[in-house]
Image (cartoon, rainbow, N blue to C red):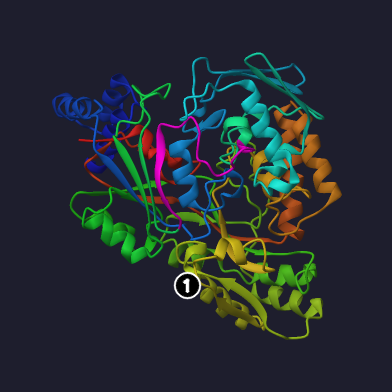
Amino acid sequence: MTTELQHLTDKVKAGTMTRREFMSKAAALGVSAAVATSFLADAAYAATPVKGGTFKMGVQGGESTNSQDPATWASDVPIAGGFCWGETLAYAGPNGLEPRVAESWEGSSDAKTWRFKVRQGITFSNGAAVTAEDVLATMQRHSNEDSKSGALGIMKGIESMRADGDVFELTLAIGNADLPYLMADYHLIIQPNGGFDDVAAAIGTGLYTLETDEPGVRMTFKKNPNHWAADEMGHYDAVEVIVLNDATARTAALQSGQVDTINRVEPKIAKLLGRAPNIDVRTTSGRGHYVFIAHVDTAPFDNNDLRLALKYALNRQEMVDKILQGFGSVGNDMPINEAYPLFDESIPQRAFDLEKAAEHYKKSGHDGSPIILRVADGAFPGAVDAAALFQQSCEAAGIPLEIKREPNDGYWSEVWNVQPYCASYWGGRPVQDQMYTTAYLSTADWNDTRWKREDFDAMLLEARAELDEGARKEIYSKMGRLLNEEGGVMVPMFNDFVDAVSSDVQGWETNPSGPQMYWTAFAKTWKA
């Protein structure tokens, strides 16, 4: 009961629960009014932000090849730092979209034309006023195939764009009711002149400004006193993002007080760490998933029977139990789960079936040579152990899976989206359209399974234009089933985001879009 009451208290601290709701839920737990009031008083005291200090984040997912160019961001460290110095038009908050560079937006009745009003009086960190022309240039840069932007797939559906006074307007070839969510993609940080003058200058509208950048080591930031919401968010004087790719080093840094929070707590130690003094483990269920991805246009993975053999050889429940330690759920070879509002729960769950795995492997006609799966510790927590479990079950089905362990440094530039079969992860996206557009549209730069199907693309465009949710759900269901049966993505599990934070840090709230409050812990928390 104490744990449940503390959870309710945390929600009051974070501002996501009212006093009346707290008292009602406490009463339902059998807690007396006097005890509940005492907890509430503590929460009220703790809910008052304290200004000052330095917030240090120990983050897995950094490499020496990292850049401040938002187009290139593919792992956690650059995203964490990027959200410090920059902002998108809107932000995917825990309860829906929150205005950022755009103070408001509206769409036409057919969802084809969208107008975003640029926040008045907002400036970049270099002192220049933010204009609709800057927004337009940003979108134009990410629409350019030469930029190699991770948001390129999102931009493909835009027919025209223009700046109209303080309004950025775009028109789609096909209407999309979810368009504002696409504009919240973390690659689309608004930059002066779109970043064309210097893509990696780290000049944005964020709560902090970049002071030090040592790729693969650390980044430091200082408070931006001219931020449009400096009085409401960004309570720290400074922020430091420290690259800690090794799980043991990350945990030790938190326990010793060298950092205030860490991401990617390994599930096998999460419960033990949660019992340590002055440390809270925060878990968030959401859309994140751990994957093995195969290029469907590259032998031997261009054979669907071989892909099905590998899919049936995945013992998903074993991985959830042994790798996630229960901090997650089984996957189903598609990037969508029940966290999405239009998820189709009637899609059959693929079972672990060695007999079917062996049957499809034989049917594939594979020559018996090693099937190489590349993996690294940094691919996802427990990735190497997960690959070992996968190899064992493949062996039982007569499938010659070979594991090649790669170094963490360079994994996201030299292995992921380059090699034909590797381990990876996705944080998910707020809506299905964005997830599919980013990773499965034929023209998407981040199409990491090389899934290029005209029928799938057509359904994606059809779903965008369909404003009836029931009809759209049917289309998404067909897309999910197609990926499940023929895609190159193998999804053994959906992971909880598991963070650990010093108990001195107050104001924490969960966000299903990503870890570390979807990388706004530095913006919304403070130290008691």
The residue depicted at 61 percent of the width and 66 percent of the height is 414
The amino acid type, in three-letter code, at marker 1 is: Asp
Residue range of the region highlighted in magenta in the rendering = 195-215
Does 178 lie within the magenta span?
no
| Side of 503 relative to 270 (left or right) | left
Residue 372, horizontal then vertical, whole percent: 65, 77
Disc 1 on helix, strand or loop? Answer: helix
Instruction: Please count the marks in the image.
Output: 1
- Please tell me in which quadrant of the rendered image residue 510 appears: top left
**Visible in this render: residue 312?**
yes
**Visible in this render: residue 285?**
no
Q: Dominant secondary structure of the magenta stretch?
A: loop
Q: Residue furthest bottom?
A: 368
| Side of 243 relative to 395 (left or right) | left
Residue 5, horizontal then vertical, whole percent: 25, 36
Does 214 lie within the magenta span?
yes
| Side of 52 relative to 316 (left or right) | left
The residue depicted at 75 percent of the width and 72 percent of the height is 306
The residue depicted at 85 percent of the width and 47 percent of the height is 455
Q: Mark 1, residues whose alpha carbon is within 10 Å: few (<14), some, or many (≥20)?
A: some
The N terminus: image quadrant: top left
**Which residue is disc 1 drawn over?**
385
Residue 37, horizontal then vertical, whole percent: 17, 24
The residue depicted at 29 percent of the width and 34 percent of the height is 236
Query: Which one is nearer the viewer's eye here, 415 or 420?
Result: 415
Query: Which one is nearer the viewer's eye here, 118 or 30?
Result: 118
Query: Which one is nearer the viewer's eye here, 445 or 270?
Result: 445
The C terminus: image quadrant: top left
Residue 51, horizontal then vertical, whole percent: 24, 29
